[in-house]
Image: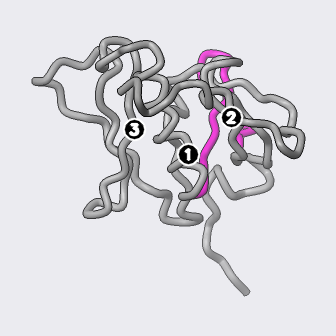
Amino acid sequence: MNTAKKCVHCDPATSREAWVNIDEDYGGPYKARVRTDYRWNGWTCPAFTFAEAMRVAADTHLLGAKYNDKGDAVEFASYDARLNAFVMTGGGRTPEDDPYIVYPTSCCGLYDIGAMNWTWVETEAPEVGDLPINTSAHLTEV
């Protein structure tokens, strides 16, 4: 019998699969595991597979480019392979502030990027062929 305790992100008693957006229209939709046992200030708390977390990270940089934000408001997520973690910078942090590090859960390997910091909302599954929200932000704007 497997007696390993599941984390809140993979335990069906405390989470389920859902699609989420950042603040309804800033990024997404992303497929996630969302907590059903807790909400941060009323907002959904998602966790992502590595592939989805990479999409979230890429979109944070596209969002910064779209609004010409160098980290004053936009919090950037960047993957650090040495740490196997996402390093969160910007979002009003000063250069003297330490970045916030998002490590994968030891149980299921999900990354809870922005889970208790960003205003995540659940949304409908995208239709086949739908483009991500930030598609209009081109890398030439960086």
Q: Secondary structure at mark 1?
A: helix
Identify the element where label 3 is drawn. Answer: strand
Badge 1 density bin: few <14, some 14–19, many ≥20, Cα 10 Å: some
| Residue matched to label 2 | 132
Q: Residue furthest front?
A: 140
Residue 98 figure quarter: top left
Q: Is there a contact, CB below 8 Å, between mark 2 and mark 3?
A: no
Mark 1 or 2: the one toward you = 2
Residue that label 1 marks:
55
- Residue 77 circle label: 3
| Residue 39 in the figure: left or right of residue 18 | left
> Viewed as shown, does residue 66 lie left or right of 132?
left
Task: Find the magenta span and give its range.
Answer: 34-49
Is residue 5 covered in magenta?
A: no
Q: Amino acid at mark 3?
A: Ala
Q: Are marks 3 and 1 in contact (CB under 8 Å)?
A: no
Q: Amino acid at mark 2?
A: Pro
Q: Along the horizontal axis of the image, is 50 left or right of 77?
A: right
Tell me the element at label 2: loop
Q: Residue at x 63, y 34 (%)?
A: 45
Give the quarter of the figure containing the C terminus: top left
Residue 108 lies, in percent from the top left, at 59, 64
Q: Which mark is residue 141?
A: none
Measured Cα–Cα span from mark 3 to mark 1: 10 Å
